[in-house]
Amino acid sequence: MKKKVALISTIAAGLLLASAVPAMPGTSSAAGVVAPKAPYDPLNPLTEQEIHSVSYLIKHSSKYKPGMRFTEIALHEPDKKAVWNWVMSSPQDKVKKSIKLPRQAEFVISYKRQVFEGIVDLDKKQIVKWKENDTGGYAMVSFAEDPSDVVRKDPAFVNALKKRGLAGKIDKVKLVGLSVGYYGPENGDPNRRLYKYTAYLDTGDGNFFTHPIENLVVTVDIDERKVLKVEDEGVIPVPMNDHGYTKGDKASKREPAKPIVITQPKGVNYRINGHEISWQGWKFHFRLDSRRGPIVSAATFNDHGKERKVLYSGGLGGMTVPYGDPGVNWYWKTYMDSGEYGIGKLGRPMVPGADVPNNTTFVDATLNDDNGKPYTSPRVIGIFERYADSDWTHMEGPRTDSRARLELVLRFISTVGNYDYTFDYVFQQNGNIKINVGASGIEAVKGAKSTSVESHDHHYIDPDNAEIRSGTLVDKNTVAVYHQHIYNFRLDMDVDGEINTVLELDPKAAPLEGNPAKKSEMVLEEKTYRTEQDAVQKFDPDKVVLITNPDKRNKLGYLSGYQIIAHAGGTHPFAEDPLFSDDDYLMKRAGYLKNHIWVTPYAKDEIYPEGKYINQNPNDTGLAKWTEQNRDIYQKDDVVWITTGTTHIPRSEEWPMMSTEWGSLMLKPFNFMDRTPTLDLPAPTEDTTAKK
């Protein structure tokens, strides 16, 4: 195949990505690229040939118009029950019966202000569904549509630069086109596709995000390629300090660290068969979605020779990054990174020895560009094992027994403008699944006149300085704005089967009578969720929320279950609530932010908690709207939705580069098994007997 470069340009928050170069499928081992010729699996992502086929059929149909943009071309999953039947069949049966499920692709196509969606039957080579979106909003922004040239020519914009002394530096001004959200009819028009452009000065230090041209915003109609408004609210100094970070800190006195070498002399413990991974009892499928990023599917755990269902499909549903400054450059910045820009589209190659350890196996992904052509996103998924502390340990008499825990990590990193998000799906030998999200990169900053913070009676906050009311002064003339990173994960749990019930166990102190030595006892109160509204809740660290199978029990009679832990760590506080009032336009658009745990009955088309078309949509068409139906979830095929994240109060130690900050959630077996599942871990090779 002839190599072809698909340049992904910069739309979302200056999304500067490397070129994506399609590559021929090949083979690899650890620390190399994996692009396997995958064996058949009904959950496999679309191949290059299949993407070509979808594009060809649409372009040669009566429905196609020149100028249409192919926002998404992705796998349309077969019937869920049929997939599970295929997954749970023996390898011999699959070969003998040549079991294959219908192969279909779904697509989203934009034509100016129109959005179309549909399905292509790849077996029959037919378009079997085509409909125009009628729910409001637009598809993800297009990397091919960038009307920044009309901004540069606009007289009001040019004059604003001259007022700032930048007349001779216009070629050094970086324009960043961003989605505009929705903030009322006086602040935008949902019937027009709009970008707002902000500007930065490229000073040559390789970090233009740290040099904002403040109080200057340009609104553009994308379709008309016309500047609608230039907002100039006064000159603020452009921060000019050198914030280059690639060459390190020249003033550092730190002693260079000696390397830690990771080796696996006997090879890795996992097997990759196409897009299926087997490791330490776990077996699961993975693929990259252009909007949601990695999706883990059909996860089973081998319990003493028996394959048991745990998770049918798990992955990011949506995410929101709202900023708290009301200024002209900021009030509209409430990025729906997944639904507006595409987390999967913005995946980038990982650096061995830094982004991932050197024992990583890399996997390429095939996606589509705006013209419907396939391209390869190289080294975009990494798979590796790591030591994860002691799994269990105990000393009895002179003898100490301890076992080391290993973890298998599936990692993906997406660069969304100034931020880089690391998504980890972590499988543990004891049956746990952790989902970690790390944020790094460059904090979003505004220019300011302030060069220091005045002390007021030893208080932290300077109440007289309006410039730092909604942000932290991280350098002279530079304020990092307060914001939140809020993620929602869609977890289609199938604990020992599709029919599940969600319940809570709430530990309580109960008064105790008749015992002079003890006045209270610890008991559990149980509550079963029967409808969607029963299950909606804030995260309570005291509660144990379980998804259980009503027909399966362990050997002691307890319901087979998995615990849902909405937050399990992270250095920033848990985002207990979005820090916006209920009448804020953001809250009207994305009601999923209001609670941390939701449960819905399985519906194939309910995927995105913020709604499918969130771009400029003034309405909530997602999770909060669906659950208003208050549907029955008792002994149903349930989907659990977890909202987690961080409230980000910037600090000096994060400037000009932010150390990765993690948040997480966990799925933990809870009476799913009969005994400790890691008794079979190998003992250390060294003698661990304590000597007196």
Image: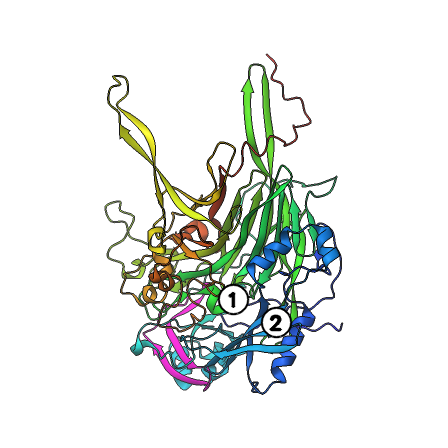
Q: Which quadrant does the N terminus fall into? A: bottom right
Q: What are the residue bounds of the magenta stretch?
A: 210-238
Q: Is residue 217 magenta?
A: yes
Of callouts 1 and 2, which one flags the residue occurring earlier in the amino acid sequence? 1
> Is residue 78 inside the magenta stretch?
no
Q: Residue furthest top?
A: 692
Give yes or no for contact between labels 1 and 2 (Cβ–Cβ under 8 Å).
Answer: no
Q: Residue at x 46, y 70 (%)?
A: 200
- Residue 686: image x %, image y %? 68, 25
Decide: few, some or many residues near mark 2? Use Cα within 10 Å; few <14, some 14-19, many ≥20: many
Q: Residue 440: x percent and y percent?
A: 50, 54
Residue 594 image point, x, y percent? 34, 57
Q: Residue at x 38, y 84 (%)?
A: 228
Residue at the image point whose x is 55% and y is 32% from the top:
676
Name which residue type carries label 1.
Answer: Gly
Residue 542 vertical position relative to residue 178 in the rendered view, above or below: above
Which residue is rendered at x = 28% and y = 30% of the image? 510
Q: How many marks?
A: 2
Find numbered disc 1 in the image and state the secondary structure of the residue it sits on: loop
Image-based side of 298 in relation to 329, left or right: right
Give x and y (percent) for residue 650: 39, 53
Cα–Cα span, label 1 and label 2: 12 Å
Image quadrant where residue 290 sits:
bottom right
Name the residue that disc number 1 marks: 342
Query: If the image is split into quadrants, where does the C terminus sit?
Result: top right
Q: Quick one: 145 or 247, which is closer to the camera?
A: 145
Q: Which residue is mark 2?
A: 368
Going by the image, does 659 lie left or right of 458?
A: right
Decide which of 593, 85 is in the foreground and name it: 85
Q: Is residue 340 above or below residue 555?
A: below
